[in-house]
Image: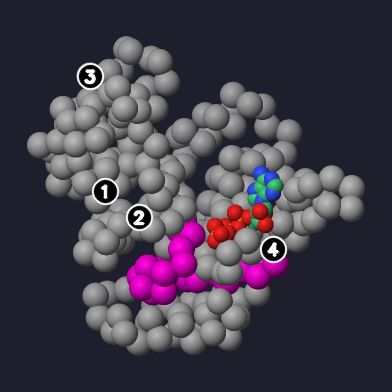
Amino acid sequence: MKKIIIGDHVIKSFGEGDEKRNVLDGVSVEIHEGEFVAVMGPSGSGKSTLMFALSGTESVDGGKVVVDGRDLSGIGENELADLRRTKMGFVFQQPTMLKNLNILDNIILPAMRGNRKNAAKMTEKARALMKRVGISELEKRDITQVSGGQLQRAGICRALMNSPRIIFGDEPTGALNSQSAQEIMDLLSEINAEGTAVMLVTHDAKVAARTERIMFMRDGTIVSDLKLPKFGGTNMEGRVEKVTVKMREIGI
Ligand SMILES: Nc1ncnc2c1ncn2[C@@H]1O[C@H](COP(=O)(O)OP(=O)(O)OP(=O)(O)O)[C@@H](O)[C@H]1O
């Protein structure tokens, strides 16, 4: 299957002089089209930094990152912004949305990038996505007038506006109660089943167990790559057990 993201001996360091250390210490990883991946590891092991490096959010200090066949080293700022906008969607623990805009506009605006010409098309797309995730009735609401789960659904709509090839999620269920977290995972699984690759950073074994591949990080490297069959709605307990056994092995 085609590789949507390649990280080849990626190095990322922070700090200067004696304080300098590699937060990513030569990480090599390939994410394939339509894959559903989780990244786990102790706090500070480099999970978010890996996601930022693979998505071109952060530049790297060594090795290379290739997105959809395009090597990010030497790519111009505008091209990188276009690549990120058209190929990738981002979902965070707390969706960062603007307080002075309603939910619908918060979903539409980043995808428009100031181009008012396609506003009608974008509005139509946003409404279709909102309907799909069950928040149609919230379009005029302010972001302070919805629940955490509803806001995260809006965040997912926003991430899907340009039909990305991959969704990156940094703890997308981290701020939700278990029922809402479950619903968000159902939604991400559906999106993945339609062919969009999904890569999630998570501390939650139940979240990771919904995916088909769990990469475990420690000290800036991937120390284990656990494969699971695609989740078909059964044997959740067995899957969680496999993940927790590995977590114990790694010392998480
Ligand atoms: N911009 C930065 N400047 C300096 N150090 C940083 C920066 N970003 C991350 N780090 C450091 O890099 C290390 C890895 O951070 P990262 O956020 O990738 O870890 P993580 O595994 O996602 O952790 P957590 O599970 O706590 O979110 C940490 O020690 C962090 O302090």
Mark closest to the chain's N terminus, 1 or 3: 3
Mark closest to the chain's N terminus, 1 or 4: 1
Q: Which colour style is shown?
A: one colour
- Give residue 148's mark: 1
**Where 34 sits versus 42, above or below?**
above
Residue in the image at 22% along x and 30% along y? 142
- Report which residue position mark 2 lands on: 175
**Residue 200 vs residue 23: left or right?**
left
Q: Are marks 1 and 2 in contact (CB under 8 Å)?
A: yes
- Give residue 30's mark: none
Residue kind at label 4, given as amino acid type: Gly
Mark closest to the chain's N terminus, 1 or 2: 1
- The x, y position of residue 159, in whole percent, is 37, 41
Task: Provide the residue span drawn in magenta.
Answer: 199-219
**Where 245 sits versus 118, above or below?**
below
The response on whether ligand 1 sits within 8 Å of label 4 is yes
Mark closest to the chain's N terminus, 3 or 2: 3
Q: CA distance from mark 4 to mark 2?
A: 25 Å
**Residue 50 vs residue 94: left or right?**
right
Residue kind at label 3, given as amino acid type: Ala
Residue kind at label 1, given as amino acid type: Gly
Q: Select label 1 or label 3 by which is in front.
A: 1
Mark closest to the chain's N terminus, 4 or 2: 2
Q: Secondary structure at mark 4?
A: loop
Q: Secondary structure at mark 1?
A: helix
- Report which residue position mark 3 lands on: 120
- Give residue 220's mark: 4
